[in-house]
């Protein structure tokens, strides 16, 4: 009873205090589904205070009664959020415009299923390999050892994390973190057996190896070596696109709004005084859509999008992954034109980095040779 009561009260109190200390009073009543806001506090208060009350009232009841009480708290939390902020219970990706789904989301590796990517051997084993090992360990522990409730609880969490990771790769950290305590106990037991018996154990070495992330990269190197190398080279090119030289060049320009690759937007915001039209955040779908339209439209249509979105600068890097994607999606679009060296009259080159592979243009509507 004291532990559960303390945890519930602590969760509610700490969340509320952090909210008061970290949030502007003007934003106290605003709900933001993906950030620390009033909806987070509401959920913590409902769940935390509900747990504390349940511990005080039902601690002497049967396991079944306590389980029903926990279910009741869950239902109460759901009803509270459904009433106050129903939008936070839905999948925000469902409301994305079709162009954003097909031309942006479909290209975001972390947002796709392990089995829907053609790089399964590259991403699959590192994402769920250790978790599967931990799940198998928990199953054997359930059948053979004590503490069945603990092992069953961990097995449920791990399997849930694996299912989530299969659905979208970005959930893999949960699967890996949950695998740690189960594998740690197994490694300890195996090591203790070695110490007692004075014998070497290949099983101990094998289990220990599964805890090293690099081990799970071996299948990718064996079965998908070309794609593994291509991914590494693509990442290297992206890093070159947004490195210190690029940021130094951008910092020499007067502050303004950039059209830039989604992967470059965070670095632009971090290292410069400029702002970006877009970024890799699904609730910024209007900016993402505008960015797509600019890079994939013909130069005449792109001009209108640039003007309507008050763009000052256009960023281009020949080696970036997004450049290749936009060229493939629209061979006649602005990105394809820039790649082939056909620069529209309304773009004035200001900076050139890495032997011309990176170009920064000033958008100058007055220079448009097709203006009516």
Image (tube, rainbow, N blue to C red):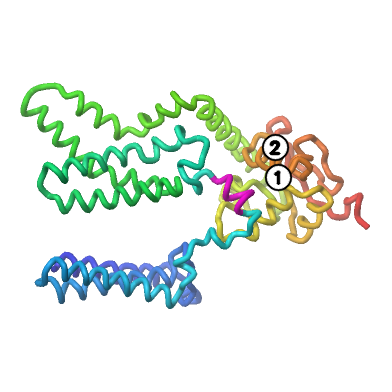
- Give the residue displayed 35% in from the left and 29% down from the top: 215
The disc placed on residue 358 is: 2
The disc placed on residue 315 is: 1
Q: Quadrant of the C terminus?
A: bottom right
Magenta part of the chain: 101-108
Q: Is residue 339 above or below residue 160?
A: above
Q: With 141 as the anchor, is 168 left or right in this view?
A: right
Residue 275 appears in the picture as rendered? no
Mark 2 vs mark 1: which is more N-terminal? 1
Q: Give the quadrant of residue 73.
A: bottom left
Residue 273 position, x and y percent, is 63, 54
Q: With 71 as the anchor, is 124 left or right in this view?
A: right
Identify the residue at the far right of this view. Answer: 372
Q: Is residue 118 above or below residue 10?
A: above
Residue 322 appears in the picture as rendered? yes
Q: Is 104 part of what is drawn in magenta?
A: yes
Identify the residue at the far left of this view. Answer: 196
The disc placed on residue 232 is: none
Q: With 224 as the anchor, is 318 left or right in this view?
A: right
Residue 117 position, x and y percent, is 51, 40
Residue 264 position, x and y percent, is 60, 45
């Amino acid at each position: 009873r004291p532990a559960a009561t303390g945890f519930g009260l602590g969760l509610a109190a700490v969340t509320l205090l952090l909210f008061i200390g970290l949030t502007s009073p003007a934003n106290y009543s605003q709900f933001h589904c993906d950030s620390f806001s009033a909806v987070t506090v509401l959920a913590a208060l409902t769940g935390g205070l509900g747990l504390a009350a349940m511990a005080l009232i039902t601690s002497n009841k049967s396991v079944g009664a306590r389980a029903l009480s926990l279910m009741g708290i869950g239902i109460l939390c759901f009803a509270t959020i459904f009433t106050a902020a129903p939008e936070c219970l839905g999948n925000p990706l469902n409301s994305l415009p079709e162009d954003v789904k097909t031309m942006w989301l479909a290209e975001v590796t972390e947002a796709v299923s392990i089995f829907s990517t053609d790089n399964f051997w590259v991403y699959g084993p590192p994402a769920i390999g250790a978790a599967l090992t931990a799940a198998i360990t928990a199953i054997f522990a359930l059948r053979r050892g004590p503490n069945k409730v603990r092992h069953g609880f961990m097995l449920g969490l791990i399997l849930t994390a694996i299912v989530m990771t299969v659905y979208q790769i970005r959930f893999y950290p949960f699967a890996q973190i949950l695998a740690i305590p189960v594998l740690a106990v197994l490694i300890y037991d195996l090591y203790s057996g070695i110490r007692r018996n004075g014998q070497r154990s290949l099983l101990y070495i094998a289990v220990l190896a599964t805890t090293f992330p690099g081990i799970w990269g071996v299948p990718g190197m064996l079965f998908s070596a070309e794609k593994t190398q291509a991914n590494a080279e693509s990442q290297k090119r992206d890093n070159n696109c947004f490195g210190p030289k690029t940021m130094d060049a951008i910092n020499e320009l007067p502050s303004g709004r950039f059209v830039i690759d989604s992967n470059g937007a965070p670095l632009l915001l971090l290292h410069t005084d400029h702002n970006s039209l877009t970024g890799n955040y699904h609730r910024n779908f209007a900016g993402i859509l505008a960015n797509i339209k600019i890079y994939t439209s013909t130069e005449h249509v792109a001009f209108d999008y640039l003007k309507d979105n008050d763009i000052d600068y256009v960023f281009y890097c020949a080696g970036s992954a997004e450049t290749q994607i936009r060229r493939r999606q629209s061979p006649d679009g602005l990105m394809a034109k820039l790649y082939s060296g056909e620069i529209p009259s309304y773009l004035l080159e200001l900076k050139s980095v890495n032997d011309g592979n990176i170009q920064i243009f000033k958008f100058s509507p007055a220079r448009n040779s097709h203006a009516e």
